[in-house]
Image: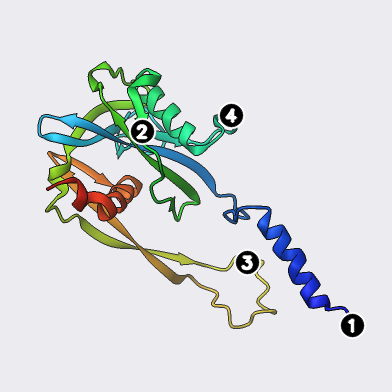
Amino acid sequence: MEDTLGLLGRKIAGRLAEREPQLDRLDYKRDAAVLLPLVETPEGPGLLFEVRSAKLKWQPGEICFPGGRFEVQDGDFAATALREAREELGLPEAAVELLPGRLDILVTHLGLVIHPYAGLIRNLEAARPNPDEVQELFTVPLKFFKDYEPRQVTMQLANRAPADFPFDLVPTMIRDWRQRIGYRVFFYVYEGHVIWGMTARILHSFWLRFGKDLVS
């Protein structure tokens, strides 16, 4: 007798071997890539941050790393990070050295998937920031983060069933808002600059995994 379950298993195994697992995008998660730029500061190696232009519609005046939305013509997320960094900072291609490997991917609660990369900028003096996107640049020496404990809060998320939810199929479903999950938000303050949100989350992840090996 044919082992139909075994045959089915072999078919599925063959399909799985042919592809890498992908993020489930049923709810349309957008991709973006950012560069975590390492630069030389008067106090040793540090990180470069941007203050977003007040003209921008999304997060004007907030602090971020260079980066932006993935475009198909980029080819991959690393190319997006490099392109956005060069465009925003006004740097030639050779001025940005992307380090091999990838930092941890951040899946946000806003449906945005951020792919961070680390890179070196050796000649920051050559930067000519795009005024339509960048209001200011500033650097933070890595040693600042050595003993720094960021403030943190837990944001609360909730959901509510829509009017057309089939309550007849799931009568136990709560009809009002229901708290589902919380997520941490970090705050770093340096010389009057407040680094928070997704940028602080990427920074915190980077420092948690690599920081103690970077500063003696």
Q: Nearer the viewer, mark 3 or mark 4?
A: 4
The answer to whether residue 114 is above or below residue 176 is above
Tell me where residue 73 appears, x and y as whole percent.
58, 29
Q: Earlier in the sequence, mark 3 or mark 1?
A: 1
Residue 73's disc is 4
The amino acid type, in three-letter code, at marker 4 is: Gln
Q: Nearer the viewer, mark 3 or mark 1?
A: 1
Q: Are marks 2 and 1 in contact (CB under 8 Å)?
A: no
Q: Quadrant of residue 66?
A: top left
Q: Which residue is mark 3?
A: 163
Task: Classify mark 1: helix, strand or loop.
Answer: loop
Q: Nearer the viewer, mark 2 or mark 3?
A: 2
The amino acid type, in three-letter code, at marker 1 is: Met
Residue 56's disc is none
Q: Earlier in the sequence, mark 4 or mark 2?
A: 2
CA neighbours of label 3 inside 10 A, class few (<14), some (14 to 19), many (20+): few
Tell me where residue 95 appears, x and y as whole percent.
33, 21
In-image side of 86 versus 185 (left or right): right
The amino acid type, in three-letter code, at marker 3 is: Ala
Tell me the residue at 57%/68% (across/down).
161
Q: Nearer the viewer, mark 4 or mark 2?
A: 4
Residue 66's disc is 2
CA neighbours of label 4 inside 10 A, class few (<14), some (14 to 19), many (20+): few
Q: Which residue is mark 1?
A: 1
The amino acid type, in three-letter code, at marker 2 is: Pro
